[in-house]
Image: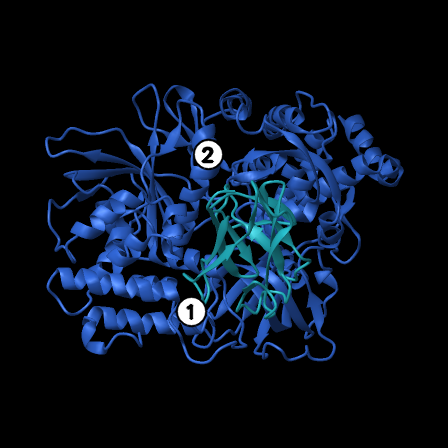
Chain colours: A cyan, B blue
């Protein structure tokens, strides 16, 4: 499975980062994690002062991608269907393919491709 | 843009680039992204982009603020040097360059840049336009074909003001009417509806074709453009799908010319009969109180109630959450410019969102730090912004703080922005403002104590009571509410049907707020219109309200006013009793009456003295009723008043 994280705002708007997971027979390894934050040891490094050092992560579990906030200062959000300008704060949430989410003040999008 | 030589850009796009850089700096973004390019396209007047948005009824400033809200302002700390272009901005400039080449040109023109942003379609401005309801396919087609700046063509719509119309329209308002009825030969302005307390003008107009055929009359509201824009959005969100079949509807987008601070909306009246509508304010003097009360119940409450007020859910809240915004700003601060990472000056009062701060305790001259409050309103001319808890759209604003002396050439603020941190020195407090408003009433009774003496009654002093009232926990009801229910916004259509207009404050909120506001405005409008403003005349009216609130029965010897007040209060109570969350408990209603009355006391310019005096007393009465109900044992304390009433009955 391939996962692309696309920056949707900020100084890196339009940049894509690609991640790939080894297949093990029919299954992708469980516990696949994409870490996001301001520190350089993250998989997705954000140039955003409103992002915490280790801000949030995307987890592959039970055949689904989950977005999890790591007790960040400024929060992790997804779009709110009822109100474009009031984003919904997230602790842990399953993600849809192509869904936008916000880490600090930077919007990102998850795109999944390839066989599961 | 560094990747493009100046020669590759038309003059127009060169200007766009300059504005884009300024915007990036103002927003402390330190990069050039698609959002800055698009704002560049919007800020230069007379282009294709601004004219397309005007066609959509979208105000340029509103779109710019919406884009800013989506991106948020950056920090003063820079994490990289220079002003790089984002990868997406680079892609868009490449597309624009290609579009220019296809046309056989070397330089990029406005349309190339706009089409590139539309084609890429995955960027922030496109998401925002989409969220604002723009039909993107049609918009793209218009962008492709729109000619730059059409001259004034077509027929000139004549504005004909009927003899019965009171007052004038200024040139801006005439201009907007012509734009709104473009294509008609004439528009006849029939009547001006009773003014609410906003600066908007509401009128009934009839559009007429070249062959003298008249179309159905409509209600036109012309007002400050940001308020009009917000009304259209609220209509879409709360009102559109909750209206009865025969009603007033917004069919079109607002008219928002890019060279005017005004915008306008048009309510089409869907009624089953011919004839003009009038607002409630215009018939109030012709109807008896009983007729009025019955009409409110049978027509207004029953028609709209089904989807609105009767859809009540349980709602537990502290009074300030729903009502604090009716009071003047809690604090006015003089802005202090402080670097981002500087520690707060010693003794700073830090105000954080979430829990309600005790702003009443903040002292004059103190330095205050406000964190993560939301900008409600911006006035660059006055150098002032208004901050509050809550965004004003889903939740009413509370704990409003006014910040003055801001240098807008150094800093930008926009509506909806969450301000990370701002410092200021207190130079005016809410208490001071309320005190000024009450002093203007020139009370002939003592205002210093916890209680005031009104005739024979001892009532809580609203000036002392309001802080505690704000903190009251309320077990109430929640539903869609109109948000500004007063006689000027309630129309009587043909066949005596009820129509509502003006949805600028419509939201999901405390159900009883609408009925408290209507009761307060009706009592002040009807019963202080024809009296002298002296305290004795006001107290006479108040006595009747006092009797009605306490359920005292009247006798034939009582005046017509006494009967009228009782009838009106009683018929509104039928509705109120139907809406309260716990049967028979009206405390949630009294809280609304208290704050609606207190707000009106501060309307020195719009409400005559007699009305303000009466409502100050009504606030005191509402506070008393609230206390009595919340603490039944406190009855003993007010035995004073009860005894007086018995005396009064005995006298007759």
* Of the pair B91 and B557, the residue shown nearer to us: B91
Tell me which corner region of the image, top left, top right, bottom left or bottom right, holds residue B60: bottom left
Callout 1 crowding tier (Cα within 10 Å): few <14, some 14–19, many ≥20: few
Callout 2 crowding tier (Cα within 10 Å): few <14, some 14–19, many ≥20: many
Quick one: quadrant of the C terminus of chain B? Answer: top right
Question: In percent of the image, x 47 and y 31: which residue is there?
Answer: B284
Does residue B535 appear in this view?
no
Q: Secondary structure at mark 2?
A: helix
How many angstroms separate mark 2 from mark 1 (CA)? 34 Å
Label 1 resides on the chain identified as B
Where residue B110 appears, as percent x and y from the top left, is 22, 63
The residue singled out by tag 2 in the image is B239
The residue singled out by tag 1 in the image is B381
Question: In percent of the image, x 61 and y 55: which residue is there?
Answer: A57
Above or below B500: residue A47: below
Quick one: quadrant of the N terminus of chain B? Answer: bottom left
Question: In percent of the image, x 62 and y 78: which residue is there?
Answer: B341
Q: Which mark is residue B240?
A: none
């Amino acid at each position: 499975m391939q996962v692309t994280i696309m920056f949707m705002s900020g100084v890196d708007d339009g940049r894509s980062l690609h991640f790939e997971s080894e297949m093990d027979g029919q299954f992708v390894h469980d516990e696949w994690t994409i870490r996001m934050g301001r520190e350089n040891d993250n998989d997705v490094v954000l140039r955003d002062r409103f992002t915490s050092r280790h801000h949030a992560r995307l987890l592959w579990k039970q055949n689904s991608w989950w977005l999890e906030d790591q007790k960040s200062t400024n929060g992790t959000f997804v779009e709110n269907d009822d109100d474009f300008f009031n984003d919904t704060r997230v602790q842990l949430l399953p993600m849809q393919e192509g869904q936008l989410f916000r880490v600090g003040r930077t919007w990102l999008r998850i795109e999944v491709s390839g066989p599961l | 843009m560094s990747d493009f030589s100046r020669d590759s850009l038309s003059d127009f796009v060169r200007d766009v680039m300059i504005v884009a850089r300024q915007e990036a700096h103002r927003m402390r973004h330190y990069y050039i992204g698609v959002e800055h390019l698009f704002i560049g396209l919007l800020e230069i007047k007379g282009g294709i982009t601004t004219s397309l948005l005007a066609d959509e009824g979208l105000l340029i400033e509103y779109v710019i603020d919406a884009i800013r809200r989506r991106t948020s302002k950056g920090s003063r700390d820079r994490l990289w040097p220079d002003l790089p272009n984002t990868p997406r901005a680079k892609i868009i400039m490449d597309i624009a360059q290609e579009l220019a080449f296809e046309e056989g040109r070397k330089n990029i023109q406005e349309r190339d840049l706009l089409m590139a942003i539309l084609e890429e379609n995955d960027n922030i401005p496109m998401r925002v336009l989409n969220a604002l309801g723009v039909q993107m396919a049609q918009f793209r087609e218009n962008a492709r074909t729109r000619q730059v700046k059409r001259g004034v063509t077509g027929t000139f719509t004549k504005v004909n003001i009927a003899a019965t119309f009171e007052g004038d329209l200024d040139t801006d308002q005439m201009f907007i009417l012509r734009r709104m009825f473009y294509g008609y030969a004439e528009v006849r302005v029939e009547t001006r509806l009773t003014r609410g307390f906003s600066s908007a003008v509401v009128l009934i107009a009839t559009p007429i074709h070249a062959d003298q055929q008249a179309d159905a009359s409509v209600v036109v509201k012309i007002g400050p453009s940001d308020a009009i824009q917000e009304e259209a959005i609220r209509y879409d969100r709360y009102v559109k799908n909750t209206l009865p079949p025969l009603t007033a509807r917004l069919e079109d987008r607002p008219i928002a010319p890019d060279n005017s601070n005004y915008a306008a909306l048009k309510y089409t009246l869907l009624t089953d009969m011919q004839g003009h509508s009038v607002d409630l304010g215009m018939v109030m003097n012709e109807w008896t109180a009983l007729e009025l009360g019955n009409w409110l119940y049978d027509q207004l409450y029953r028609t709209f109630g089904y989807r609105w007020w009767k859809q009540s859910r349980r709602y537990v809240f502290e009074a300030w959450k729903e009502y604090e915004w009716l009071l003047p700003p809690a604090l006015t601060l003089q802005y202090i410019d402080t670097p981002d990472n500087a520690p707060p000056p010693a003794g700073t009062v830090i105000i954080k969102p979430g829990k309600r701060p005790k702003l009443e305790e903040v002292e004059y001259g103190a330095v205050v730090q406000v964190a993560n409050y939301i900008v409600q309103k911006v006035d660059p001319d006055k150098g002032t912004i208004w901050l509050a808890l809550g965004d004003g759209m889903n939740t009413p604003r509370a704990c409003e703080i006014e910040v003055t002396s801001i240098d807008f050439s150094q800093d930008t603020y926009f509506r909806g922005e969450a301000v990370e941190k701002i410092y200021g020195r207190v130079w005016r407090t809410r208490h001071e403002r309320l005190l000024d408003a009450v002093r203007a009433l020139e009370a002939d009774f003592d205002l210093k104590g916890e209680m005031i003496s009104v005739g024979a009654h001892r009532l809580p002093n609203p000036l002392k009571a309001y802080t505690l009232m704000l903190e009251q926990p309320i077990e109430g009801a929640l539903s869609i509410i109109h948000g500004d229910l007063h006689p000027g916004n309630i129309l009587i259509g043909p066949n005596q049907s009820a129509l509502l207009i003006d949805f600028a404050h419509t939201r999901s909120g405390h159900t009883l707020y609408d009925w408290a506001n209507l009761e307060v405005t009706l009592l002040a409008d009807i019963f202080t219109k024809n009296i002298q403003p002296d305290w004795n005349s006001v107290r006479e009216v108040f006595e009747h309200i006092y009797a009605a609130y306490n359920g005292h029965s009247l006798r034939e010897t009582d005046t017509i006013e006494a009967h009228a007040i009782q009838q009106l209060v009683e018929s509104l109570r039928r509705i109120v009793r139907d809406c309260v969350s716990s049967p028979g408990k009206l405390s949630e209603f009294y809280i609304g009456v208290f704050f609606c009355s207190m707000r009106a006391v501060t309307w020195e310019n719009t409400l005559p003295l007699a009305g303000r005096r009466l409502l100050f007393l009504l606030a005191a009465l509402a506070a008393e009723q609230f206390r009595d109900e919340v603490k039944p044992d406190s009855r003993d304390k007010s035995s004073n008043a009860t005894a007086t009433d018995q005396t009064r009955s005995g006298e007759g």
